[in-house]
C-alpha cells in the first residue's frame, strides 16, 4: 500500500467520522480532548512502529528534569515513513478537518517540531504531570492543540504510562486518563 493511498484513507476516515468526532470533542470533560481509535490504517501504523529509531542511535536528545527521567526526543532527521506522517499532519486538508472538528480556526503546524517530533520513555523512566508551553518560543504564536500518536503495540495496563489530562482549579480537581494501548490511536487535547 503506497503512502499516498494511506494518506487518502486517513483523510477519508476523518471526513466520514467528522460529526461524531466533533460531538465527542465538545462532550469531553473537564476540557476538550479527543481520542481517535483506528486513526491510521494498521499497515501504516505498523510501518511507523517498524521504522521507529532504536534509543541507542544518534539523533535522540536525552531529557532528564524533575518531571521527566529517561525520556528521549527527536525533532528532526526522521525516517521517511515518520517524516511522511508529519507531512500528513501538516497538510492543509488535515488541519482544516481538525479545525472543523475542534472549532479551533487557522491551525498552523510547527515546522520545527519544537516540543514535538518523536518521543520515547525508556525502562524506568517517566514523564510526570507538567504544563506544556503556551507560546511557541520562535513563532510567538499561541499553542492551541497537541496531537499525540501512540505506537505502543501490545501495551499492557501494568506497564503504566497512561496519559493523564488534569484540570486543577481551587478545590476542583479532575483528570481524564487515556490509555496509550492502540498503535493506531490519535489523541488531541486543547
Image (cartoon, rainbow, N blue to C red):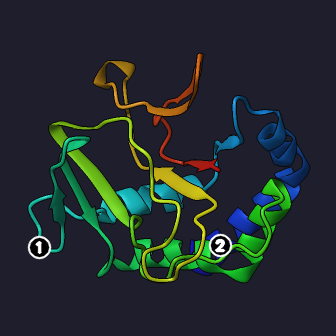
Q: Against 146, is 166 above or below?
A: above
Look at 32% across and 79% down and name the residue there.
76
Quadrant containing the N terminus in the rendered view: bottom right
Q: Position of residue 116 (x, y in %)?
A: 41, 65
Q: Which mark is residue 58?
A: 1
Q: Against 7, is 154 above or below?
A: above
The single residue placed furthest to the right in the displayed view is: 19
Image quarter of residue 185: top right
Element class at badge 2: helix
Image quarter of residue 172: top right
Of 144 and 4, nearer the camera is: 144
Of 127 and 92, nearer the camera is: 127
N-terminal of the pair, mark 1 or mark 2, is: 2
Look at 54% across and 48% down and name the residue there.
184
- Report the side of 48 relative to 29 (left or right): left
Label count reads 2
Look at 83% across and 40% down and name the residue there.
26
Q: Which mark is residue 138?
A: none
Camera sees residue 106: yes
Camera sees residue 12: no
- Local packing at callout 1 (Cα closer than 10 Å; few below 14, some 14-19, many 20+) is few
Q: Which mark is residue 7?
A: 2
The single residue placed furthest to the front in the displayed view is: 170
- Report the side of 150 relative to 19 (left or right): left
- Report the side of 179 relative to 6 (left or right): left
Q: Position of residue 13 (x, y in %)?
A: 77, 58
Element class at badge 1: loop
- Local packing at callout 2 (Cα closer than 10 Å; few below 14, some 14-19, many 20+) is many
Instruction: Determine the CA span between mark 1 and mark 2.
Output: 29 Å
Look at 21% across and 57% down and name the residue there.
72
In this rendering, the label closer to the viewer, 1 or 2: 1
Image quarter of residue 59: bottom left
Amino acid at each position: 500500500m503506497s503512502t499516498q493511498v494511506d494518506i487518502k484513507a486517513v483523510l477519508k476516515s476523518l471526513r466520514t467520522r467528522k460529526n461524531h468526532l466533533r460531538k465527542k470533542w465538545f462532550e469531553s470533560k473537564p476540557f476538550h480532548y479527543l481520542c481517535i481509535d483506528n486513526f491510521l490504517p494498521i499497515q501504516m501504523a505498523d510501518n511507523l512502529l517498524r521504522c521507529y529509531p532504536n534509543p541507542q542511535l544518534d539523533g535522540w536528545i536525552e531529557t532528564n528534569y524533575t518531571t521527566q527521567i529517561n525520556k528521549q526526543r527527536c525533532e528532526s532527521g526522521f525516517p521517511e515513513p515518520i517524516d511522511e506522517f508529519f507531512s500528513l499532519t501538516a497538510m492543509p486538508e488535515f488541519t482544516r478537518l481538525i479545525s472543523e472538528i475542534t472549532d479551533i480556526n487557522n491551525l498552523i503546524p510547527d515546522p520545527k517540531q519544537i516540543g514535538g517530533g518523536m518521543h520515547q520513555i525508556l525502562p524506568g523512566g517517566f514523564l510526570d504531570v507538567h504544563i506544556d508551553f503556551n507560546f511557541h518560543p520562535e513563532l510567538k504564536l499561541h499553542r492551541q492543540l497537541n496531537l499525540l500518536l501512540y505506537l505502543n503495540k501490545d501495551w499492557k495496563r501494568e506497564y503504566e504510562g497512561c496519559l493523564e489530562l488534569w484540570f486543577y482549579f481551587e478545590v476542583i480537581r479532575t483528570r481524564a486518563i487515556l490509555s496509550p494501548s492502540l498503535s493506531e490511536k490519535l489523541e488531541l487535547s486543547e
